[in-house]
Image (cartoon, rainbow, N blue to C red):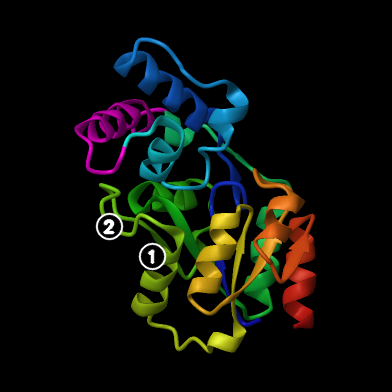
Amino acid sequence: MNNLFFDLDGTIINSERGIMKSFKYMYKNTLGYVPHDDDTLRKFIGPTLGASFEKYDGVGLTDPKAKEMFNTFREYYAVDGWEQFDVYDGVPEMLKGLHDAGKEVFIATSKPETFAKQIIDQIGMKPYIHHVFGASDDEETRTLKEDVIAYGIKKTSVDLNMNNLVMVGDRSSDIVGAHKNNLKAIGVTYGFGTHEELDEAHCEWIVNTPQDIVKLAMEK
């Protein structure tokens, strides 16, 4: 494994605080109340907003209500929400370890690319990240993880050997997105997904800590 695409939310950072507050702000300002409990809202973290609206609210991507919800979410997230996160323990050491070992590390996230780049800058990990790929800022293109991965493969200036490129993520969407691009995937259990979810997505490897990723990358 010489090249690794990493998910961001649930793999590099725990973004729950900012995203949950943004969802609650959105619902209170569009519906007047929050229709989901916290356990359900946590399931929104990882996929794109549009996918979550469609699955949990029955609001299709072309529905004007989806645009209103998206814009209201951004009102909070763009100002305060994106900064409310924590870096998972061991992640800085993992990224440095991979970098020092000559591995190329990329971010491939369903989060809008502008916010993803801001976060990588803020946590001081830019020296260890070759490039950041994310959803389009309006989330109207590259709306699925598979689209982001395909975009990253196409756009990167690094000559990627597909046999040495893997996707690392915490949700089934990361695994499915990798497989649809003919990549293998490493699932992490310290994020928002579960071991069962990753196993059902036929993840090739499942690890429990960031350091496990370094060990695996060195072995394979």
Q: Is residue 3 above or below residue 185?
A: below
CA neighbours of label 1 inside 10 A, class few (<14), some (14 to 19), many (20+):
many
**Residue farthest along the left direction in this orientation:** 64
CA neighbours of label 2 inside 10 A, class few (<14), some (14 to 19), many (20+):
few
Relative to residue 113, is residue 8 drawn left or right? right
Residue at label 1? 147
Q: How far across and down, in percent of the image, does residue 39 sit?
A: 62, 28
Q: Residue flagged by tag 1: what amino acid is it?
A: Asp
Query: Which quadrant would the N terminus be assigned to in this image?
Result: bottom right
Q: How far across and down, in percent of the image, does residue 36 sit?
A: 51, 21
Q: Residue at x 53, y 86 (%)?
A: 162
Q: How far across and down, in percent of the image, does residue 117 sit?
A: 40, 53
**Residue farthest along the top direction in this orientation:** 32
Front in this rendered view, residue 77 or 197:
197
Q: Residue at x 41, y 11 (%)?
A: 33
Quadrant in the rendering for residue 128: bottom right
Segment tinted magenta in the rendering: 60-80
Relative to residue 133, is residue 103 drawn left or right? right
Q: Is residue 86 magenta?
A: no
Mark 2–mark 1 Cα distance, whole angstroms, equals 8 Å
Q: Residue flagged by tag 2: what amino acid is it?
A: Thr
Name the mark on residue 112.
none
Q: How far across and down, in percent of the image, does residue 3 sit?
A: 57, 78
Under circle 2, the secondary element is loop
Front in this rendered view, residue 216 or 55:
55
Q: Is residue 111 above or below residue 207?
A: above
Residue at label 2? 141
Query: Which quadrant would the C terminus be assigned to in this image?
Result: bottom right
Residues at circles 2 and 1 in contact by the CB criterion of under 8 Å: yes
Q: Is residue 163 above or below residue 204?
A: below
